Structure formats: C-alpha cells, structure tokens
Image (cartoon, grey):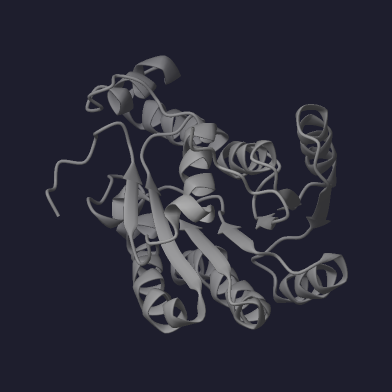
Amino acid sequence: MLKIDLSGKLAFTTASSKGIGFGTARILAKAGADVILLSRSEENLKRAKEKIRAESNVEVNYIVADLSKREDLERTVKELSDTGEPDIFFFSTGGPKPGYFMEMNIEDWEGAVNLLLRPAVYLTRALVPAMERRGFGRIIYLTSVAIKEPIPNIALSNVVRISMAGLVRTLAKELGPKGITVNGIMPGIIRTDRMIQLARDRAKREGKNVEEALNVYTKPIPLRRLGEPEEIGYLVAFLASDLGSYINGAMIPVDGGRLNSVF
C-alpha cells in the first residue's frame, strides 16, 4: 500500500496559525514532517502548536512575523537559519481587502504586492540555496482560482495573484535541474475566516444575510459544499512526497469542480 511518508523532512508553512496554512501544517505533521509555523499572532500560534503536537509525534516550532514588513522578513530568515533548513516550503497568506478596481487606491495595490508577492520572492531566495546544496526541495505556493477566472469584488487578489503563476513556471524551469520542484495550488471556496469575511462583505452589499451569501458561493460548485483547509493539505503533502516527484511547474485547482475553463 502506498503511503505518504515525510519523516525526516522539515516543512516551513506561512500563515499557519489557522485556515489553510494551519490545515496544511496539520497534514504535513501527520505525514511525519517536523513543522515550523509562522503567523502574526503568537497566541494563535501557541494554540496551533499544541493542536498539532497533540495529534502528531513531530517537532513543532513557530515564528511570529508579519511578512508584509521587511524587518519581519529579515528576522524570519535569521530565525529559520537558527532552527533548521526546510526541505518543504509552503507559502500561504491571507488575501488583501475585498473591493472593486475603482475602490482601490495606490496604497491598496502596494499593500497587496507586499502581502502576496514580495514575501514569497524574499523567502524563496533565502531558502533555495540550502535546497540546492542538498539536491532536494519542494516549493508550493498557494494562489487562487481567480488566476484562471477572476472573481467579482476581489480586484486586488485577481490581479496580483496572477504573478504567482509566473513565479511557479519560472522557478520550475530554473530549479528543476537542481532537484527542486515548484508548484502552485489554486484553491476554490475554502471554509476559512477570509471566506466568511468575503461573505459578510457581499451580504452587506446585496442586502442578504451571511448564510445566503455563502449559498451564492457554493451554488456553482458541483460538489455543493465548501472545501476544508485540510483538503489543500492533502495535495501539499502529495506534492512534497516522493509520489509527487515528477510534478513540476503545475498550477493545480482544488475547487470541487467550480472552474469552467478547459485550460
């Protein structure tokens, strides 16, 4: 029987005190990987650490940082060098504020780049040299189905997240010969605090309650339900394992069949 086994691997997961980042860290730990969590809230990180430790016999550490701040990025890299050299890097982040294009100012666009793209580039540059020395690495970026089909009311995310697809394809070609695979995951509607925020915003705009707004999001999904954070984690664990060793440069949707586009 095939089994995903990440024993002996160290995984670094961002935005991992809750939501998709936490769900992914849980699955990686259950597969045997030691994990380093990162989030802005130490209180949330402590809770996440205890939950993972309670269900997995692995080492769990965490870093408190706001990756939209340059000084926190620099400190994160230093703390990582003191903790270990990650074999697996899962980059996740919360989304920028919702809204339509003309509602966003230049500061909003700069903030979206500092949240979604700059930390991914900065941390990747810091982690790749050690992966190159070992001849092994797994880099997985969380993006969005909005890359394929823009979603109403999240203009910032629609535009800036597309750059992550370019990063995936570029690094897959550059790092593949060095034993490092790079892939992207495009989640659909996942049950997270961010999803509830979007539903509340939509409900306010359209005069609905939150449950009615959530139903609007789930109706186009063939499976007729929201995804769970751990369902992203299952794919991350597969891509990080030997079973996913020939998958490189892929942008994979996990959306219950929601996307309509063929390519």
Q: Above or below — where is 262 with respect to 161? A: above
**In which image quadrant can residue 49 be found?**
top right
* Residue depicted at x 31% and y 28%: 217
The C terminus sits in image quarter: bottom left
* Residue depicted at x 56% and y 59%: 91
Q: Above or below — where is 98 with respect to 247? A: above
Image x and y of residue 12, in percent = 68, 58
Image x and y of residue 61, in percent = 83, 51
Q: Nearer the viewer, residue 159 or 124?
A: 124
Q: Nearer the viewer, residue 133 or 166?
A: 133
* Residue depicted at x 76% and y 74%: 77
Q: Residue furthest left?
A: 262
Image x and y of residue 62, in percent = 81, 52
Camera sees residue 117: yes
Camera sees residue 96: no
Q: In this view, does 84 lie to the left or right of 113?
A: right
Q: Which of 225 and 219 is in front in this view?
A: 225
Query: How many numbered dots are placed on residues in this image?
Result: 0
Q: Is residue 64 left or right of residue 226?
A: right
Image x and y of residue 139, in percent = 53, 64
**In which image quadrant can residue 28 be found?**
top right
